[in-house]
Every structure is written in C-alpha cells, then in structure tokens.
Image (cartoon, helix red, strand yellow):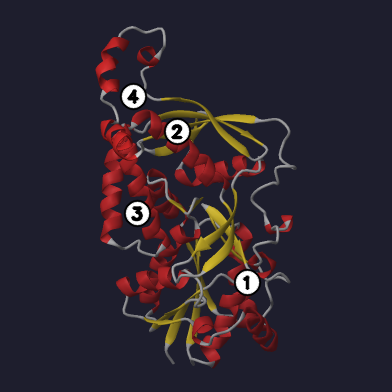
C-alpha cells in the first residue's frame, strides 16, 4: 500500500480527505499540521481528530519562528498588500508546503495530499511548491471528486467523522492574519455577523480611551514596542493583541482569485495593519521620492507573486535582495494612536531622516524663494502649449 502525507488542519475538508484517501485511493495516510501561528487549540485539534477518526500517525511541525522571520518580515519590507489587504494565508502556504515535502521525504511517502477545492487559490500555492521540491504524486480528493461542502458534511456523517462546528465558515489562521469565507458570507449584501470575528473587537466594543504606542524599526523591520525589544514572533503577536483590542484590522473585500473568480473575503489582520502603517510612515521620512515611487512598483509585484503562489520564483528572491538594500536606512521610531477602529500615525523620527525641519519652515531663508521664479515659470510647459493649441 502506498503512503501519503496529508496536510491536515482537522477541519471539514481535510478530515474528509483522510477517509477518502483510504477508501477511494487505497493509501496509508500520515497526517501533518504545520504550526504557523494558529491558536493553540487549532494546533492541538488536528492530532486529536486524527486519533478520533482512526488513530493515524500525526506530526505537528512548529514553524512559527521561521514564518515570522523569513516570511512575514520580508513581506513587511515590501509592504505586501493584495488589492488593499495584508497577505496572510498566501504568505504561509509556501512554508507549509515546504515542511510537508520535508516530512514526505522523511516518511518515504509516495504522495502528498491536500484538502483544497478546485475553486480557490491554495491549490496553486501548495502544488507549485510541492512540484518544485518533490517528485511525489499530488492528490486533491475534494477537487478530484468535485465535492460540495454539503456533500462533504454528508460523507463525514456517514463515516462517523466529527464535524468541526455547525457553521459552514471556512477559516484559516496564522500569525499574520485570519481569513473567513463561506456560508452566508458568500452573499456580498450580508453584513458579517459579529461571531465570525475572534481577533478584533467591534469599534463599538473597543475601549473608549485611545492608546498611543511607539514602534521601533531597524533596517525596515520592527524590533520593539514602547521600548520593549521583542523577537519577531512575539512582536507580531503583541501587535495583533494591541490593534485587535481597538477594533483595527477588519477587511471585507470582493477579491479577484487566481482562476478569475471574484470572491467575497473577510479578513482580520490587526497586527499587520499596525506594523505596515508604521513602516510606510518611516519610509516616507527616510526614502527619496524616486525610491518611494519605485517601492510601490516593487510592492505590487512582490504581493502578486505571493498571492499567485510564486514564492519559489527567482524574481521574488531578486526583489528580496533589492528590498534589503533599500531598507537599510528605514530605521527609527513611529508613534501611533489607536482608537475605536481608527489607526493614525501621529509622530515619527529617524537618524536617517531626509526631512529637514529648518529648511521647510516658513521662517527659514536658507532656500531663497526668489530662485524659484525661473523654475515655476517653465513648469508644465507642454501642458500649457497643449491648452493654447486645443482648448481655445
């Protein structure tokens, strides 16, 4: 009997996959959960579910520190946003796939399986990495059998597989964010119910009193909150708690998937919003106008590579080298005010600041205003000529 390693979350899709792999594919199943910052119960549940379903061999792989330092921090340098929201699920998928491949090799497995449907993005993200690192066969039972969510639930009941919950939400969590989709959320006119959220308070329930914090950066990445130096894992976690408490980080978006479908997606990314807001504010102070304009291009390209499952693309590595050089001057402290869903930058300073307070002051005479006359006179010359020729 061939052996398969199943990327296993303990949710409906992957729980159903265990029995499908046995019954439909005649394979010995080994399950594995990669910890990229999910809540503790979400890490403990897969092992318990694997035991309940059939005492399967299960591996829990702790990749939290690697995710924070080698994936999240480079994404911070790039201000990685896709269609306006911080990438979380897409950022974790390549690391999960890498760890599953490593385990498959160690187990001598013939195949790797996942619970992705044929409508989502994760099938691309997982399989692109798996194929680049392994010769293992890839099996996707939910996609291959064209199963609906209701059909999965019926099959689970018939096999005695415990259902994760009565809700039909599909939820993915990691250190950088939480994604919620499915069920009533598929109707874009339905407001997400409050029980769909767990990382963020509503603005109404957030504290009445605002909170001001200071975030310190070194070479483009955060290193301290209010003077307290933290490792990447703990710093991101603390930012999630701080911003989430004040109702910051909720996203409700109609997103463009890789395959061309538009989908309604709900995200909670409190720490990401907080860190990226501070990072952008510091870039504005330390990078030149041309660098900032080019950084936007880099950010868009970098973000699309991540979203599209192209972490292994050489261009992403090239951009990492470029960003590391550009970010060498992005060091300093940013002060932010958090209040009932509002996030504002209210102060910033850097030893590498290109902002010169004396020169920009209206009281300064270092820059002789009279010298601007010639520059202003010839400014927008082509536009002026166009207006005279065609707008008479």
In this view, the residue in front, 71 or 59, is 71
Disc 2/disc 4 C-alpha distance (Å): 13 Å
Mark 1 or mark 2, which is nearer to you? 2
In this figure, which residue is indicated by the disc labeled 4? 354
Q: Of marks 1 and 4, which one's residue comes earlier in the chain?
A: 1
Q: Secondary structure at mark 4?
A: loop
Q: Position of residue 259 (x, y in %)?
A: 45, 72
Q: Position of residue 251 (x, y in %)?
A: 59, 52
Mark 1 or mark 3, which is nearer to you? 3
Disc 3/disc 2 C-alpha distance (Å): 21 Å
Q: Residue at x 50, y 82 (%)?
A: 143
In this figure, which residue is indicated by the disc labeled 2? 281
Q: Of marks 1 and 2, which one's residue comes earlier in the chain?
A: 1
Q: Quadrant of residue 216?
A: top left
Label number found at residue 48: 1
Q: Of marks 2 and 4, which one's residue comes earlier in the chain?
A: 2
In this view, the residue in front, 292 or 57, is 292
In this figure, which residue is indicated by the disc labeled 3? 301
Disc 1/disc 4 C-alpha distance (Å): 55 Å
Q: Of marks 1 and 3, which one's residue comes earlier in the chain?
A: 1
Q: Secondary structure at mark 3?
A: helix
Mark 1 or mark 4, which is nearer to you? 4
Label number found at residue 266: none
Image: 255 above or below 364: below
């Amino acid at each position: 009997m061939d052996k398969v390693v199943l990327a296993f979350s303990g949710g409906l899709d992957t729980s159903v996959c265990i029995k499908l792999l046995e019954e439909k594919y005649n394979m010995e199943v080994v399950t594995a959960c990669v910890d990229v910052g999910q809540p503790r119960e979400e890490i403990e549940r897969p092992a318990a579910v694997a035991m309940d379903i059939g005492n399967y061999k299960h591996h829990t792989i702790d990749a939290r520190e690697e995710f924070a330092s080698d994936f999240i921090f480079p994404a911070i340098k790039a201000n990685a946003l896709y269609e306006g929201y911080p990438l979380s699920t897409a950022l974790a998928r390549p690391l999960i796939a890498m760890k599953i491949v490593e385990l498959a090799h160690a187990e001598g497995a013939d195949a790797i399986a996942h619970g992705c449907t044929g409508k989502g993005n994760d099938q691309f993200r997982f399989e692109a990495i798996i194929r680049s690192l392994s010769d293992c066969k890839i099996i996707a039972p939910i996609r291959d059998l064209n199963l609906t969510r209701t059909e999965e639930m019926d099959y689970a009941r018939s096999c005695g597989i415990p259902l994760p919950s009565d809700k039909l939400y599909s939820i993915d969590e990691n250190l950088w964010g939480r994604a919620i989709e499915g069920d009533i959320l598929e109707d874009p006119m339905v407001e997400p119910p409050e029980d769909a959220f767990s990382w963020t308070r509503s603005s109404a329930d957030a504290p009445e009193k605002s909170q001001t914090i200071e975030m310190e950066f070194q070479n483009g990445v955060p290193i301290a909150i209010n003077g307290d130096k933290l490792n990447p894992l703990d710093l991101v976690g603390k930012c999630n708690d701080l911003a989430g408490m004040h109702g910051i980080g909720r996203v409700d978006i109609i997103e463009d998937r890789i395959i061309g479908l538009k989908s309604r997606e709900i995200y909670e990314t409190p720490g990401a919003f907080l860190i990226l807001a501070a990072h952008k504010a510091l870039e504005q102070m330390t990078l030149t106008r041309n660098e900032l304009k080019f950084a936007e291009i880099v950010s868009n390209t970098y973000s699309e590579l991540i979203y599209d499952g192209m972490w292994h693309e050489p261009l992403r590595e090239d951009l990492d080298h470029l960003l590391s050089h550009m970010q060498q001057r992005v060091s300093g402290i940013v002060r932010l005010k958090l209040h009932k869903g509002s996030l504002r930058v209210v102060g910033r300073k850097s030893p590498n600041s290109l902002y010169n307070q004396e020169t920009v002051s209206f009281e300064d005479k270092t820059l002789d205003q009279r010298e601007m006359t010639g520059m202003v006179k010839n400014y927008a010359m082509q536009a002026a000529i166009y207006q005279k020729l065609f707008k008479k």
